Image (cartoon, helix red, strand yellow):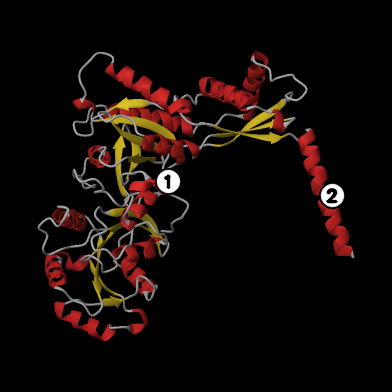
Amino acid sequence: MAFDRSKTYGNIPVVVLVGRPNVGKSTLFNRLVRTRRAITDPTPGVTRDPVVKDVFIREKPVRLIDTGGFKLDNDGGADGLDSLVVEKTLETIKSADAIVLLLEAGVLTAEDEEFIALLRPYQKRLIVAVNKTEGGRREQESFNLFSFGFERIYCISAEHGDRIAELEDAIIGALDFSGVIEALPPEKEPIRIAILGKPNTGKSTLSNRLTASEGSLVSDIPGTTRDVVEGAFTYKNRAFILLDTAGIRRKSKVTENIEYYSVNRAIKTIDEADIVFLMIDAQEGLADQDKKIAALASGKGRGIIMALNKWDAMPAIKNTFEAVRDRIRFLFGKMEYAPVVAVSAKTGLGADTLLDTAIRLHRQLTTQIDTGPLNQALERWLEECPPPQGPQTRFKVKYAVQVSTRPVKFVMFVSRIHAVTESYIAYLRNKMRKELGFKEIPIEIEIRASRRSKDAQDAAHATHTKHTRHTKHTAV
């Protein structure tokens, strides 16, 4: 079966990368997905949650999972999370179609030997790779691993790319693609949700509840989540993909390189999402950081739902939610359109409302208005509130078109660009929200000079003059 990289596939084989800390699993993960998705750092134990990415390897769709490092002495570690990481890794192995065990050239530790013993029940699904053998370094020493009963060992360098092609061939050769489901039609594509917010607002707890899994580690320790953890679930016959991210603190409080990369990765998930769940601790209230996150998401045209988490711990006083919601809308100013939902990630309170709201926002984000009805509405709005008529402020709106969905963007062609005020654009944007079905999402309006406008004529004249001069110079 031939696969198309531009399409989405379901029921694809799962490949998991395992090994002790610092053998290069995340570097290999990034090499195979051909992007810096997993965080890499010399500090052992950087990866905690499984990092998932659907990729194409040798033109075949594969779900690749990077796991936390296996530690023999998993008594909890300094931050109390080592045992949770190991448990998560072992759980991920059970559901994998192929397991890539990564070892380090010339270094075989007690942890390696213990892990090899644990993997014996999965021998038929096991692919063994020895990392850090760039230029043939320590390859001879790696042959000692055959004493463990391995039929084949792949000596690679994840950092330099040595013999990665051979490993890719081995991975694909070990997988069965007969059960892969054809691509979904566009209207049934998964709704992609990014969960963002400050540390300890309940992002991972919400992710685990919605996905009905323990995909994200949950701890009271701020900064537990480092990588982006991807999960999938179905609600009311709609597929969802959830991206759980690291907590975002003020830049001045980010002191570790690992946290810096985690925060950057969290912010980049906005580009991969349709909608952002902005998690706000209902007991602590809003912070400046919440406003910055919302502004980033709004600037990229993503739908935003403000999730007031830990609502189960709020006092049961009449109209409390309305008062908190109104205060949020007041503080967020121009983002009063964004829905506010009270939830409890711990108990499940408000989860249905949150997902119903996400479906509604996704419908708005994917709405396309035909040019005819759009300009009929525009003509009516111009009659209801005509543009200014002063000698310096006069302009005419010629016509408008919608140029994109997700994000929703319109282009309006006018006679004089510089005369168009922000207040009039805001008026038109509000009309679009109320009458065209975009009540709860950000809308971008770009103003351009119409072909017959003076601005356009001046621009055309400047371009013609430049071209004429260039032609004359070339002729000489």
SS state under label 2: helix
Between 178 and 266, the one nearer to me in the picture: 266
Residue 214, position in %: x, y? 20, 45
**Rendered-image quadrant of the N terminus:** bottom left
- Which disc number belongs to residue 344? none
Sort mark 1 into few (<14), some (14-19) or many (20+) by Cα contacts within 10 Å.
few
Q: CA distance from mark 2 to mark 1?
A: 43 Å
Sort mark 2 into few (<14), some (14-19) or many (20+) by Cα contacts within 10 Å.
few
- Based on the displayed image, in which of its 4 quarters is residue 383 positioned? top right
Residue 66, position in %: x, y? 28, 59
Mark 2 or 1, which is nearer the eye? Answer: 2
- Horizontal side of 321 relative to 124 (left or right) equals right
Figure check: 31 above or below 469: below
How many marks on residues?
2
Figure check: 283 above or below 155: above
Give the residue furthest to the bottom.
140
Q: Which residue is mark 2?
A: 465
The residue at 54%/20% (across/down) is 435
Task: Give amino acid for label 2.
Answer: Thr
Q: Which residue is mark 1?
A: 272
**Rendered-image quadrant of the C terminus:** bottom right
Between 455 and 234, the one nearer to me in the picture: 455
Between 53 and 327, the one nearer to me in the picture: 327
Task: Give amino acid for label 1.
Answer: Glu
Residue 381, position in %: x, y? 63, 18
Callouts 2 and 1 close, C-beta under 8 Å: no
Is residue 136 at all visible to an observer of this figure? yes
Is residue 183 at all visible to an observer of this figure? no
For marks 2 and 1 on the same chain, the one whose residue lies earlier in the sequence: 1
- Horizontal side of 44 relative to 429 (left or right) equals left
SS state under label 1: helix
